[in-house]
Image: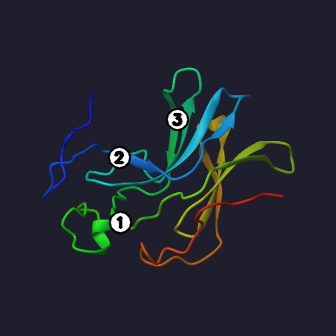
C-alpha cells in the first residue's frame, strides 16, 4: 500500500513516511543481503523500520527483515526550533548514525553490530532475522537532538 504523500504543515513540499539513512550499506554476499541502519522518521506516524537495522535482498531490493530497537521515534529539525513541522512524537531522535559492522564473534558466528545515538551498541544475529543478541551502553545520552551524544558517524572493530 503506498504511503501518504501530503504536504508538510505550512508548506507545499510533499512528504513520505519513511526513516532516514545516514550511513553506507553493509554488504553480506553470503546471505545475499545488504544492511542499512536507519534513523528516525521525519513525520508522523513513525514506521516500524525507523531506528532499526534493515536487511534488503541484494537481487530484488525487497526487505528481508527489519529489527527495530526504538519505537515511535519521529523527529526533524523543526522540533528543535519553531515546532511548526515537528511530528507528534517529537523524538527522542535516537538514529543509527553509522554503518552496521558485520564481524565474527570469538566462537566464529557472524554478528552485526550497530551503534545508536542513544549511547547503546547492539549485536544482531543475521541468521535469526536480526534478533538482538545483546546491547551495551557505551555513553550516556541526552534527551535527544542536539544533545544525543551516543554513536554518530562511525564505529570500528578489532
Q: In this picture, is 80 found above or below 66?
A: below
Q: Residues within 10 Å of mark 2 (few under 14, many from 20)?
A: some
- Checking the image for residue 133, the label placed there is none
Tally the numbered discs.
3
Query: Which residue in the protein does label 1 denote?
Result: 91
Query: Which residue in the protein does label 3 denote?
Result: 65
- Checking the image for residue 47, the label placed there is 2
- Please provide percent x and percent y for residue 102: 72, 45
Q: Residues within 10 Å of mark 3 (few under 14, many from 20)?
A: some
Mark 3–mark 1 Cα distance, whole angstroms, equals 24 Å
Q: Quadrant of the C terminus?
A: bottom right
- Residue furthest front as drawn: 12
Label 3 sits on a secondary structure element that is strand
Q: In this picture, is 112 found above or below 90?
A: above
Residue 40 appears left or right of 103: left
Q: Quadrant of the N terminus?
A: top left
Q: Earlier in the sequence, mark 3 or mark 1?
A: 3
Q: Are marks 3 and 1 in contact (CB under 8 Å)?
A: no
Residue 112 appears left or right of 68: right
Observer-nearest of 146 and 129: 146
- Please provide percent x and percent y for residue 4: 21, 38
Mark 2–mark 1 Cα distance, whole angstroms, equals 13 Å
Q: Residues within 10 Å of mark 1 (few under 14, many from 20)?
A: many
Q: Earlier in the sequence, mark 2 or mark 1?
A: 2
Amino acid at each position: 500500500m503506498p504511503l501518504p504523500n501530503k504536504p508538510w504543515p505550512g508548506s507545499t513540499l510533499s512528504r513520505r513516511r519513511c526513516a532516514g539513512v545516514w550511513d553506507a550499506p553493509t554488504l553480506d554476499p553470503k546471505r545475499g543481503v545488504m544492511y542499512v541502519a536507519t534513523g528516525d522518521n521525519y513525520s508522523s506516524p513513525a514506521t516500524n523500520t525507523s531506528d532499526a537495522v534493515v536487511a534488503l535482498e541484494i537481487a530484488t531490493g525487497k526487505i528481508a527483515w527489519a529489527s527495530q530497537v526504538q519505537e515511535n521515534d519521529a523527529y526533524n529539525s523543526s522540533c528543535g526550533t519553531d515546532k511548526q513541522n515537528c511530528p507528534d512524537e517529537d523524538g527522542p531522535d535516537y538514529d543509527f548514525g553509522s554503518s552496521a559492522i558485520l564481524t565474527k564473534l570469538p566462537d566464529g558466528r557472524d554478528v552485526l553490530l550497530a551503534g545508536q545515538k542513544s549511547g547503546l551498541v547492539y549485536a544482531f544475529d543475521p541468521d535469526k532475522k536480526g534478533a538482538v543478541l545483546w546491547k551495551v551502553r557505551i555513553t550516556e545520552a541526552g534527551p535527544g537532538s542536539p544533545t544525543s551524544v551516543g554513536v554518530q558517524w562511525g564505529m570500528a572493530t578489532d
